[in-house]
Amino acid sequence: MKLTYLLLFLLIPGLLGIANGHTVDSVGEYRVEIGWMNEPVVSGETNAIEFYVSPLEPNVDLEDQVFKNGITGLKKTIKMQLVYKNENITLPLSTDHDIPGKYYVFVNPTVSGFYQANILGAIKDTPISLSMHPPKVAERAYIEFPEPSDLTLNQIIDGHTALLSDVQDLKESMNDLKKTQQNNVEYLGVIVGAIGIIIALVALVKLKKS
């Protein structure tokens, strides 16, 4: 029993760090921090990236500093560019009216994976162009329970769109084949016809025997 309590005591600080899931950095004389508002964050769910700005404490390591004395008035001077692979979107800050120096950027991450947040603008007289990385967005299906018995409308639309795309690709491939290998296509047609005749003869023989 004592060993169990000891293990829990050792694990709890690490679990708290994982649950927090915020990233901290610094620019000039300022400490900046980002993280998802709702964790765990999953795809297809409206969420927000929390953004904190506060003065750096002198003679204190960055990882030991906490958010306090937040910097206000940055709503119009800073924007956040969210990047996923080759796509990006620039979003404005929304002010938290209860906590000075805390801001939000609302977004609905539609796919799972790692996103990059580029902080652009200025903190008072200090320019900022900083790339930060909030925790990974998980696949929504991992936490859904029970699994839906019917296809959703979006899944049906996506499947129909994919099918149309495949059919169009097949048509284009057949057209290319006809243009470049007309003789081979005709030869292939003769072979297919011969196979059909053979199958018909075999069926006829079996029918007579029965």
Image (cartoon, grey):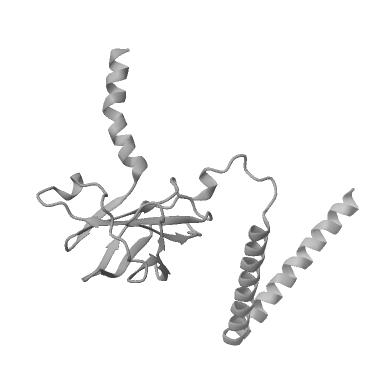
Counting from the top left corner in percent of width and height, residue 154 is at 64, 60
Identify which residue, 3 or 183, lies in the foreground.
3
Q: On the picture, is 181 further left or further right than 18?
A: right
Residue 197: quadrant of the picture: bottom right
Identify which residue, 61 or 39, lies in the foreground.
61
Q: Residue furthest top?
A: 1
- In this orientation, does residue 76 appear? yes
- Residue at the (24%, 69%) spot, across then down: 124
Q: Residue furthest left?
A: 59
Placement of 187 over or under 38, stated as above or below: below
Counting from the top left corner in percent of width and height, residue 103 is at 38, 58
Q: On the picture, is 24 further left or further right than 208?
A: left
Image quadrant occupied by the N terminus: top left
Placement of 77 over or under 185, stated as above or below: above
Residue 97: quadrant of the picture: bottom left
Counting from the top left corner in percent of width and height, residue 140 is at 52, 49
The count of marks equals 0
Identify which residue, 196 or 60, lies in the foreground.
60
Residue 25: quadrant of the picture: bottom left
- In this orientation, does residue 113 appear? no
Placement of 175 over or under 44, stated as above or below: below
Counting from the top left corner in percent of width and height, residue 62 is at 18, 50
- Residue at the (32%, 49%) spot, across then down: 22
